[in-house]
Image (cartoon, grey):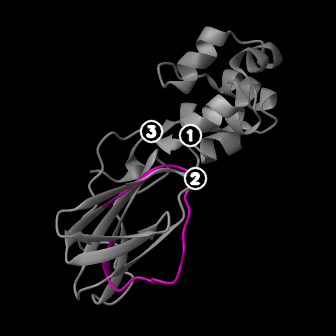
Amino acid sequence: MGDHKEQPLRVGAAVRRRRRALELTLAVVAERSGLSVPFLSQVENERARPSRPSLERIADALRTTAVELLAAADPACSVDVVRADTDAVAPPESHTRSLVRGHHQLHAMEFTGDHDEGREVQHRNDELMYVADGAVEVEAEGRAHRLGRGDTLYLSGGVRHRWRATVPDTRVIVVAVADHIEALEDRHRRGA
């Protein structure tokens, strides 16, 4: 249970990502595919599953193949458990663990112990940092922010920042909107 391999695929998100990457409207894809805008909208929003011939028409309109769209599809699971003992990639004193599997709208990571304090990062979309244990210092927008257990820090997309643990056994949870999600401000700049 909760294993993505057991779940049917949701191709709508892959169709939407491909269409947006090509900067096409639903109307253009409808014209190219011979399918209706309402049907394409239902496909993108997972309210309709395209038949194999319809998926091939959509893929042709998006200059790809049905196989590629299926490969990029999300598993159709609404619940997935990531156990605490999975994905251990480093010794306990310094550990990074993904809290969400697959290609979703949110990424969540758990950082335990030391963190590369010299590495400045900048993400396209918003992120939230929560200190589960210990303490950190975050440098953002030219200011240092000291956070302790239970504190959160919200960073808007585009803000350059770096952080470091200031006490041993610090554990930080970072939840961010995935980079493949188009930020609201990006849509407004393009006039969509």
| Left or right: 94 in relation to 83 | right
Crowding at dot 1, Cα within 10 Å, few <14 / some 14-19 / many 20+, comes out as: some
Magenta stretch in the rendered image: 111-129
Tell me the quarter of the picture where residue 39 sits. Answer: top right
Which residue is disc 3 drawn over? 8
Q: Residue at x 68, y 9 (%)?
A: 36
Between residue 42 and residue 20, name the one nearer to us: 20
Task: Tell us which disc is closer to us: 3 or 1.
Answer: 1
Which residue is disc 1 drawn over? 183
Q: Quick check: marks 2 and 3 in contact, CB under 8 Å?
A: no
The reply to whether residue 39 is visible in this rendering is: yes
Which residue is disc 2 drawn over? 124
Q: Secondary structure at mark 3?
A: loop
How far separated are the C-alphas under marks 1 and 2?
A: 8 Å
Which numbered disc, 2 or 3, marks the residue that appears first in the sequence? 3
The reply to whether residue 15 is visible in this rendering is: no
Q: Quick check: marks 1 and 2 in contact, CB under 8 Å?
A: yes
Which numbered disc, 3 or 1, marks the residue that appears first in the sequence? 3
- Give the image location of residue 84, x and y in percent: 23, 69
